[in-house]
Amino acid sequence: MTESAQEFYGRWARLYDLIARRTPGIARLRDRAAAACRLDPGDTVVEMGCGTGANLPYLRERVGPEGTVIGLDFTGPVLERARAATAAYDNVHVLRGDATRPPVGSEGSEGDAGEIDAVLATFVAGMLEDPADAVDDWCDLVGPDGTVVLANAARSQEWYAPPVNAVFRAIVVLSTPPTTKLRYEDDPHRRLDEKIDAAHARLRERAIAVADETHVFGVVRLTGGRLE
């Protein structure tokens, strides 16, 4: 029987946390993602799919002690690590929930923080069935002049891409549940590319100002969009 995504990511929470915090260059990427959110002291930011909480301190640094940071994820063991990592901050809240139906931003919702100034989603779009639809929902959540930022991994488009993409494909296959499956009806890395392309394209459509960056040999795409 195929294991669920929650079981898969829960089982690998410790390794994921190590990769999320110790991969060379990852700290700079997280700092750039936080900067792209265009946050000011006192703002409210929601991270969709916060994982083990590696981005949350960077976001808290931007909003200051008077701001609010909300991290949302659906996997219990992963959230436990996020809560432990941010326990010292009384304005960082970690909630369990689905990024496609976030329990924030509506009257009476759990962790309601009023107007949301920015939404950040890193390495999340590829896990969703309809990432473009999710991006629409995230854009609708932010207030006037708010920002949505996406960071995702997809195949590199650089001139030196072939060896980079070979490694990337192996990582995608190994990280796609179930890990024991040797053959897929269609390549996981191609499905991932399609989802990432759709998510970033939808953000560009919705935004009135867009900034794009690439990192890690062109594998990581960072897009920030300012909404009306």
Image (tube, grey):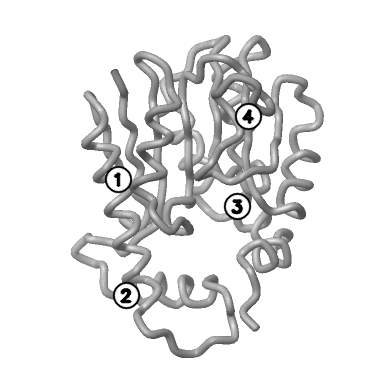
Q: Element at badge 3?
A: helix
Foreground residue among 164 and 171: 171
Neighbour tally class for label 1: few under 14, some 14-19, many 20 plus, Cα within 10 Å: many
- CA gap between label 2 and label 1 equals 24 Å
- From the image, state whether disc 4 or disc 3 is nearer to you: 4
The amino acid pointed to by label 4 is Ile
Comes first in the chain, label 2 or label 3? 3
Q: Quadrant of residue 16?
A: bottom right
Using the image, determine if residue 49 lies above or below residue 142: below
Badge 2 or badge 1: first in the primary sequence: 2
Residue type of the residue flagged with mark 3: Ala
Q: In terms of secondary structure, where does tag 2 sit?
A: helix
Q: Mark 1 = which residue?
A: 200
The residue beneath circle 3 is 20
Of tags 3 and 1, which is closer to the observer? 1
Q: Within 10 angstroms of label 3, few (less than 14), some, or many (20 or more) residues?
A: some
Mark 3 or mark 1: which comes first in sequence?
Answer: 3
Residue under numbered circle 2? 163
Estimate the x, y position of residue 208 in percent, counting from the top left: 22, 24
How far apart are labels 4 and 3 at the CA level?
Answer: 18 Å
Residue at 30% across / 45% down in the picture? 200
Residue bearing mark 4: 70
Q: CA distance from mark 1 to mark 4?
A: 22 Å
Element marked by disc 1: helix
